[in-house]
Structure formats: structure tokens, C-alpha cells
Amino acid sequence: MTFSQLAWTNIRSSKRKYAAYFVSSAFVMMVYFVYSFFAFHPAFAQSEIGEYVTIGMRFAQSIIYVFSFFFILYSMGAFLKARKKEFGILTMVGASHTQLRKLVFLENMMIGTLASIGGIAVGITVSWLLLLFGSHVISMDEPLAFYVPITAIWTTFLSFFILFFIISIYKVIAIKNSNLLELLKGTRKPKPEPKASTWKAWLAAFCLFVGYVVALLVKGAFVIAAMIPVTIIVCIGTYLLFTQLSVYIITKLKQKQTFFWKGTTLISLSDLAYRMKDNARMFFFVAIISTVAFSAIGTLVGLISGSYKQLDASYPFDFKYASSVQNEKEAEHQALIERMLGEERLPYEKFTITYATEQDENGRATAVIPVSTYEKFADWAGEEKVSVTGNEAVFFMEPTHLWLANKQTERTLANETFAIQDTKASSKIVSLSPASEMVVSDEAYEHVSKERRTNVTIYEIAREEDLQAIGETLTKAIGEQEQEKYTFEAREYVMATAKQGGGVILFVGLFIGVVFFVAAGSFLYFRLYADVEDDRRQFDRLKKMGLIQEELSRVITTRLALLFFVPIIIATLHGYVALTSMQNIFGYNLWKERIIVLGSFVLFQCVYFFFVRKSYLRHVEEGLRN
């Protein structure tokens, strides 16, 4: 038998051991291929958002590729550790360390090649399915056609072939020249009783408490300033939670004899401290990765949803044409708009409002509106009326930005000082100009230069219609806009363009988050099957001592539940706090996004838990029968 045949035989005979490694690697490659498929799609070369799609997909590919390196590196290390006894047997029958390294290299390259082929094959199928609704996800005007992705196939295959080759070389070099006895013992080595440092345990609780409190209390720009220190503090607290606080709590529970000596609790808690200590780094890694997945997807969904709401508020009118007094095309453009609306038989209401732009003492632009004009606008648009006289003024801001309003009590414009009576929130009045809006008395308005005045004409369609097509037509018909002279905004067309970009971001972010979460589940699976032989021997001894099948299932379920849900519960708490902190930055309510994202991941983890529990119980029971 050649080394290649031996490597292939090992893979086939250890299907269960390699299943998670193979499937997870293939999944990562599948996602990478899907991004490549869309990045190289010829339709994007002709579309308006093609450049943004390509950039987004290439960015996602980079993230997935870097993550894959560390994921495969960890996975391979876990397998090598679990196979020490197998290496010991091979050494005993005459295999040298060089031959063992060659065997490991061949096995890993075979798995990598098979995973690449499998991932690409599944990726082609998934890409075809995504094409059926992908154009709707990223709001493209024309559906995407299927094409033969030769470039995507070769890019994916070569990228991961190189990745597996580098990792395989690194790992075989890193394999230690252990003696035969050490290899044959495998993972069965006596372990010292884990001990927890009391002050480190309390430090873990303190770090998490401080990190959570700061993250939940800070608002606005202070969230950005606090983000890095809070992240560091929470990471330290999380690591100490798994290495110290968990062992400390278990030790205290063991001291409560009424609890410890009750039913199968004795068996469950006896080696729980050992398991927590052994798995501390893995728990920490899973918790942090899951938190990143929760936070990234939740923030993306919330940010895009909030941006749509903000955009909707920023463009409250169906069509808006703003023209300075220097614009000689104003009458021509208005006639064009009204003619095209008439051709489409769209009944509309028209309103024109004039404001003047002045700079204050700090150089900030301010749109000045006379109170008489504002009152007419308020009657037409259903806004709250205001009252100003003399040099009094009322400021207007976006509702979501009202908390940013400073305590300024006066502002100087056109050599006139105005006393600010109030600051009000109004999306409609704020949308009239890119500058700050201020309502003043008619007398004060006369001091503003007539050359700086702007006429804003608003068109509101009287019935519900899909205005995206005519909005795009009007935008192109009016032509390239001259910001100093005139601008035209079509609400539905602006929203559709924004949703194209948002769809790309969500498409990219969602898959990256899912990859992170699947990887976290794979780490748990690897760790579980690394200990399966030791667990089976332990349960065999307990069964001989009188442990019945029902009690055995209860003990296994408890162990698996702790392994699967402790890091996920911590990650869910971290994710909830992180999303709340993001909410405090943007001023959007993300409760719906938090429930959807966190609930979906917890539900997925529960399904994954029951699937693994059933498989693990069957595996243990088969071993006990043998």
C-alpha cells in the first residue's frame, strides 16, 4: 500500500471524525465561490451599481479568505491532537516521524481538494438559486442571467489549494517528535485539579459589569470614543469568565452538598471544572466570533433599515426642484416637469417657497425663511406654526438630530443678531435646503440679499403611484445638475438607488456573519468529538457501576448543553449590548432587528444542538455496545 492509498483509507475510515472539518471547509469555499460568481458576473459591468457590487464582493472574499486561514489552521490542529494515539500505533509498527508528516500532508491536501470541489459544486447550485431572486435583493432593474463562471471556479480552487498547501506545510513542520509512550497515551493524561483565583474571578465580573454599563449609558459620538476601551474590557472579562469565574462558581456549587449529591448532578459537576478549564480558550473564541456575527449582521440590518427611514424622512416630497435666482433654466425645467407629469396623467399639487442663504459669524450656511412664507407652507404641508417678531428666530432640525441641538441663544446673519426662541423638529422644512433652516420675521428677511435667494418648487402626486420610472426619466431629462444653480430630487428614484447599495451591503454582510456563526458551531463540534473516546470509556465504567440509560442520556445532554449554550448565551448578551450601543449612535430603535437577529441565531443553535446530541448519543451507545 502506498502512502497515498494509506492517506485515502484513513480519510474513508474516519468519516465521522472528518465530517465537520470537510463540511465546514466546503461551506466556507462555497460562500467564497458565490461572492466570486457575482463579482465576475458580466451583467454588473453594464449596470450602474456594478462597481459597488464588485468592490463589495471582493471585500467579502478578502474577509472570508483571511478567516478561512485561521479556521482551517485551528481545525487541523484539533485533529492532530485527537489523533495522537493513532500516530503512536503507526510509530509502533515502524513509521518514522518523516513518514507521519508526509501522511498528514497528503491527508490534508486530499481533504482540501475534495472540499474545494464540493464547495464549488454546491456554490454553482446556490448561485443559480440566488440568481432567481438576487436581482431583487440588490434592486437591479434587469434580472441576472446565468453564465459559466470559469474565472470564479479557477479563482476559488487555486486560492484554497494554495491556502491548504501553506497550512499543511506549516502543520507538518510544527508536529513535535513525541516519544512512543506519549503518543499512545493520546489525550489520556492525568490533569491537576483546576483552581480559580478569587480576585481574577471577581475581576471578570467587574470587567463585564463596567463594560456593559458604559456601553449602555454612553450616547452619540461618545459611543465611538468608548468603543475600543469597552471592547478590550469586555474581552478581558469574557476570557476571565471562562478561565476563572466559571471554575470558581463550579467549586462553590460542589461545596453545597444538598445540591452536589442530588441525582446525576454529582456526575455532571465532577469533571465540569476540568472541561471548563480545558475548553476555556475555545469558549472564548466561540463567544467572540459569535458576538462579531451577531453585531455585524444586527448592525447592518439596523443601519440599512434606519438609513431607509432617515432617507424617507429626508425626502418627504415626491418631486422637488430648487433653483437660485441666477438660474436661467428655471422656467424651462418647471415646464418640462409639468409636461411629463401631464403626459403620465398624474394629478399633482404644486407649492413654491422662497428662502435666502446667509452665513453666520462662524461661516455656517443658514437658510432664512420669512414667517409669512413659512405659515403658508405650514398650512399646505400640515406643519406646526410659529410666531416671531423683530429679531426673534426659530431654528429647525431633523427629528433624529434634535438631541444635537446646542444651547446657542443667538446667531448673527447679514450683520443682524437674532435671538433664537426655540429649536423645533421638522423633516419637511429641513428638506428644503442642505443648510440649517431658520424662520425670521418678514422685516428681518428684507435685510437678506436678494441675490442669495432660492425658489423651491414642490410637486406632490395626488394619488398612490409607482413614481420610480418617471423619477428616473425626469432626473435624466433635466440633465447634470448644477448645485450652485439648481437641483432636482425624485423621491422614489432616490430611494431605489439607495436600496441598490443597501442590498449589496446586506448581501455581503449576511453571508460573512453566517460564515462566522457556522465556524463557531464547527469549533464546538471539533471539540466534542476530540473528547468522544474519553467520554465513552468514562460512561462505560459508569454503566458497569449501575448508571441506567435514562441517566446516561441526562448526563450527556447536560454536558452538551453546557458546551453549546454557555458561549452562545454570553455571545447573545454581548450582541444585545453591542446592538443597543449601536442604537445609541444613530438614534434608531433597533429592538426589532435585535429580536430577529439574536432570535434567529439562538433558534439555529437549538436545532444544531438537537442534531448533534442525537448523533453523539448514537455514537456513544454504539461504542458501549461494542
Image (cartoon, rainbow, N blue to C red):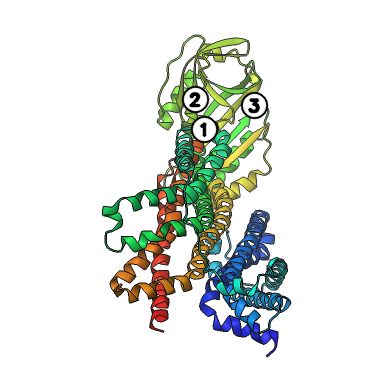
Q: Residues within 10 Å of mark 2 (few under 14, many from 20)?
A: many
Up the image or down, 106 lies above or below 264; here it is below
Please name the residue that numbered disc 1 is placed on: 220
Please name the residue that numbered disc 2 is placed on: 396
Asked whether, in this view, residue 390 is left or right of residue 40, the answer is left
User: How far apart are labels 2 and 3 at the CA level?
Assistant: 24 Å
Res. 345 in view: no
Foreground label between 2 and 1: 1
Seen from the viewer's position, the closer of residues 553 and 327 is 553
Q: Residue 586's spot in the image, x, y percent?
A: 51, 38
Asked whether, in this view, residue 378 is left or right of residue 135, the answer is left
Up the image or down, 424 lies above or below 582; here it is above
Could you say whether the residue bearing mark 2 is in a helix, strand or loop?
strand
Label placed on residue 310: none
Pointers 2 and 1 in contact (CB under 8 A)? no
Residue at 46% across, 39% down: 212
Label placed on residue 325: 3
Q: Mark 3 is on which residue type?
A: Val
Q: Earlier in the sequence, mark 2 or mark 1?
A: 1
Q: Give the position of the N terminus as an image quadrant.
A: bottom right
Could you say whether the residue bearing mark 1 is in a helix, strand or loop?
loop
Q: Residue 101's spot in the image, x, y percent?
A: 70, 74
